[in-house]
Image (cartoon, coloured by chain):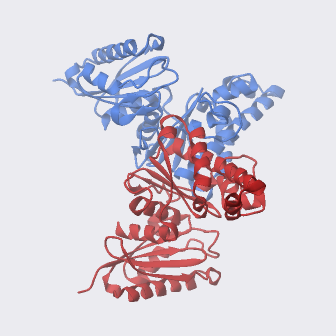
Chain colours: A blue, B red
Amino acid sequence: MAKSALVGVDLGGTKIYTAVADLRGRIISEVIVPTGAERGPAAVIDEIVRSVDDALCAAGIGRRALKAVGAGAPGPVVFARGLIADPPNLPRWCNVPLGAILEERLGTTVLVDNDANLAGLAEVRFGAAKGFRDVVYVTVSTGIGGGIIFGGEVFRGADGAAGEVGHMTVLPGGPRCNCGNRGCLEAVASGTAFRRLHGYTTKDAAERIARGGVSGRKARRDIDELAEWLGLGLANLANILNPQVIVVGGGLSNLGPILFVPLRKAVKKYGFSIAGRRVKVLRAKLGKRVGVMGAIALALE
Amino acid sequence: MAKSALVGVDLGGTKIYTAVADLRGRIISEVIVPTGAERGPAAVIDEIVRSVDDALCAAGIGRRALKAVGAGAPGPVVFARGLIADPPNLPRWCNVPLGAILEERLGTTVLVDNDANLAGLAEVRFGAAKGFRDVVYVTVSTGIGGGIIFGGEVFRGADGAAGEVGHMTVLPGGPRCNCGNRGCLEAVASGTAFRRLHGYTTKDAAERIARGGVSGRKARRDIDELAEWLGLGLANLANILNPQVIVVGGGLSNLGPILFVPLRKAVKKYGFSIAGRRVKVLRAKLGKRVGVMGAIALALE
């Protein structure tokens, strides 16, 4: 008897992560391949289709048992049309109707959303924010992205472009951001910003702090400063949205308490009234699978 | 035959504005009285009950025909419990269960919400944003407040405290805000902030600009600077929420084009990608009745 299955695809700038899951969202098989983004959209889409087939094959499931595919892609994504607008790390992708193309190629329903929205959905369904309804997810690594999950659903805004929290201006006239503006949260509180400002990475910072001494104390002050900026940004989100929880994921969340202790302090400092007092700041739980699990959560809906 | 009616109450720091409306939201009678906030909650609540009776009497409608009461109060309001938390301009109101008290006194359903949420709802139902579903309303006068209306419904957040857009930090280390923090949007872009910074009011500024000359040019530069700050704040909201429309109300919206021309320019400047390009910035339409019309819209639901 043929089993029914879902597929999640996490399309990143460097890797395509594909997984087959059962109808309860449990992963049966996984395939990870390089994106080869430099070859342009058509080749990448071929790669996605091949990965889906490979993952189905590994799971012992035929294409006809495939009920739905969820796919996450670098934002902005026009959700209703499955359209990928103009992601900075997928060159030559400009308004590619990924949803429609994959539907035709795979012969099943395909939903496409912003990867940060899906990561947020995954943390709410399966991770750090399980059991909470009103959640903001913020991923902090080379850039800063966000997903807003309220009432248990992704809040996409009018054009599916909500959640671009990395481009809120927090330091007018501050460092130049990749988007062209100055003083965006991403330009002062991302891993890239840290490295540009201090000449070493946040991973180096964690090692120096572990070793202690003068250089460890300096590294701790530098991380405290990043935490202050990030906390200011998260408090702005709390004041505007009044979530129960803000989940922080992405590479920088691996810093653990050396980030989260000063971060929680900064959120309390900049938070306003009830929203500021009530919000919990939690560390993401799902790690590298967060994107593909979000894509599966989307397919589940 | 008894007509059915709704009542809206706009409880402000200086005035209580009460109106009786029919079931389509059309106003039949209005009563405006001073709040007398210094007398404390019990006396103010007596005043509200008296106003409701007076307005019903003026409309020729008995209490038994009253289907529901909507009330707007200075935030934060815990919507689900009709609880007024700790509004700065209603002294000695601390966690007053206004909804429950009015329900008992008036013998009908009473819903209480933040006045900025209700003003936003009114502009969506009856005003500048009629026909739009995803709207942020920002009121700029002595302070700055906000209401988020998405999918045609008020977005209240986990504790009913969403929309406190005036307390987003936009200038870290900047001027002190009433909330105790520094560099809140309210501390750099409200009427109070303008007066503190420049020593004259935005109304004076409008008059000077109309008269022209050196002092008019100076006033225009000062308004441009306020518009730049306000535009930065509105662009942050656009980037986070991706609304179709941001409606700007409150006293400062009366400045008209001298505010809105530089304001729209600043929103485009700080806006990100799709959300920034698409958002429309509109001037509120409902004037002084916005609060009571929002309260009626709430009662209608």
- Observer-nearest of A99 and B212: B212
> Where in the figure is residue B262, as x and y percent of width and height?
62, 47
Q: Quadrant of the C terminus of chain B?
A: bottom left
Relative to residue A225, is residue B156 depicted above or below?
Answer: below
> Where in the figure is residue B278, as x and y percent of width and height?
47, 40
Numbered label tally: 0
Relative to residue B261, is residue A87 depicted above or below?
Answer: above
> Where in the figure is residue A61, as x and y percent of width and height?
24, 20
- Observer-nearest of A140 and B168: B168
Locate residue A163 relative to residue A179 in the image: left or right.
left
What residue is drawn where x is 48% and y is 71%?
B289
Q: Quadrant of residue B58?
A: bottom left
- Observer-nearest of B173 and A286: B173
Q: Quadrant of residue A191?
A: top right
What residue is drawn where x is 41% and y is 43%?
A158
Q: Is residue B182 visible?
A: no
Residue extending farthest left: A1
Relative to residue A28, is residue B278 depicted above or below?
Answer: below
> Where in the figure is residue B180, as x and y percent of width and height?
72, 58
Locate residue A217 relative to residue A168 in the image: left or right.
right
Q: Quadrant of the N terminus of chain B?
A: bottom left
